[in-house]
Amino acid sequence: MIYLDYASTTPLNKTVMKEIKKYFYNIFANPSSLHFLGQKSLKAVDESREKIKEIINADFPNEIIFTSSATESNNLAIKGLAFLYFFRFKIKPHIISSKIEHPSILEPLKDLKNLYLIDYDLVDVDKFGVVNIDDILKKIRENTLLISIHYVNSETGTIQPIYKISEAIKIINEKRKDFKIIFHTDASQAPLTEEIDVKKLGVDMMTISSHKIYGPKGIACLFKKNNILIERLISGSNQEFSIRPSTEAVPLIVGFSKALEIVTRQRKIFRKKADSLRRYFIKKLKENKINFEINSELKLTSPKILNLFFPQKTSQEILIYLDSKKIYVSSGMACKSRSNQPSEVLSILYPNSERPFKSIRFSFGYETKKEDLDKVVNYLKKFLH
């Protein structure tokens, strides 16, 4: 098979698998147990948290809150903040985000607004899918308490100017007397190719997902600065500093931290490789006179993602054909693929166009080879000519 859907998920790294096995079979105790085996489990969780803290340059280990998924982390950031301000401080928060966010941002905003707990605005993006910082600033109100902008778009790979946005928010916050604006970014698609140092980015909260970086599924985290207060969404015991109660998934936490350690160490190498693969693929498509257009500005995107428009066939037709050849690609974000709807991101970028119905996302990983791309090009040539 040829797998080119790494933006939806990645296989588990073999080194990570070796690392986590013993926490399923040998050191399997509950980290809350006081006996020796329980304390060994707790030590593994503490060491993993410390490792992630160091990698993202957080100040304290308790700024890393483990969750079950990036979706949960995003919900915790948005709903946790909204509940705190609405119910405790009696303030109806205003939140700003963008029109091309992941559903785990957009749906919580809709839900909260339907419950009359928040107001929100979504900013437009330019033709390349980049937010305009001035547009964000224009939408700020007195009760704006959160701005959430994703780091790397999962469909086009477009990288948002997170640091510049954070700098603009800092200037606004300096003039504010009461509540400061909190800045959150969903960085689920970022760690393989982009810097995730929270100080360099200037973020207050950040979501990271394990299964996007060769770690296990079912684990993610929310970085939250210590001075940011949020309400917990799940009630229970005092795990995760009482913010996210439930018995810690020790093997998954260990695997997540190990995977993040590996991809951070290899980021520059992989970025170079992904860039080379993407350029090679485009070159081969052109050499074979395949009719296509790129749905992004390459210099503004993560090199692991390439979204292409093929005018001759629909996305579904191309997907089914490639699937029959054991070539696995996507027409957009995996969580929306079963709805059989055109890409919402491309519908925003290219309104009144057939592009959302005729585009394919190719995403590259450590295992991708140029020979794989040669085969894909040959099959596309046969099918599209």
Image (tube, helix red, strand yellow):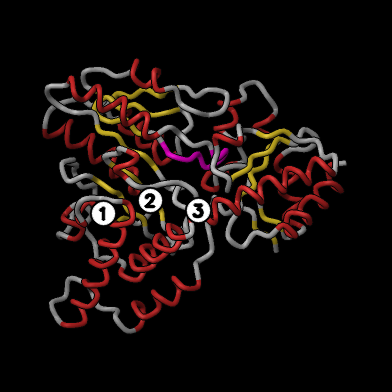
Mark-to-mark CA distance, 1 and 2:
10 Å
Q: Residues within 10 Å of mark 1 (few under 14, many from 20)?
A: many
Q: Quadrant of the C terminus?
A: top right
Q: Amino acid at mark 1?
A: Ile
Q: Is residue 75 left or right of residue 334?
A: left
Mark-to-mark CA distance, 1 and 3:
27 Å
Q: Amino acid at mark 2?
A: Ile
Residue drawn at (72%, 48%), measured in percent from left and top? 280
Upstream in the sequence, badge 1 or badge 2?
1
Q: Residues within 10 Å of mark 2 (few under 14, many from 20)?
A: many
Q: Give the mark toward the camera: 1 or 3.
A: 3
Q: Is residue 357 magenta?
A: no
Identify the mark at residue 268; answer none if there is no mark. 3
Q: Are marks 1 and 3 in contact (CB under 8 Å)?
A: no
Q: Quadrant of the N terminus?
A: bottom right
SS at mark 3 in the image: helix
Upstream in the sequence, badge 2 or badge 3?
2
Residue 42: percent from the left, percent from the top? 21, 71
Quadrant housing residue 270: bottom right
Per the image, the residue denoted by label 2 is: 208
Residue 16: percent from the left, percent from the top? 44, 70
Residue drawn at (35%, 57%), measured in percent from left and top? 68
Q: Give the mark toward the camera: 2 or 3.
A: 3
Mark-to-mark CA distance, 2 and 3:
19 Å
Residue drawn at (47%, 57%), measured in percent from left and top? 213
Per the image, the residue denoted by label 1 is: 65
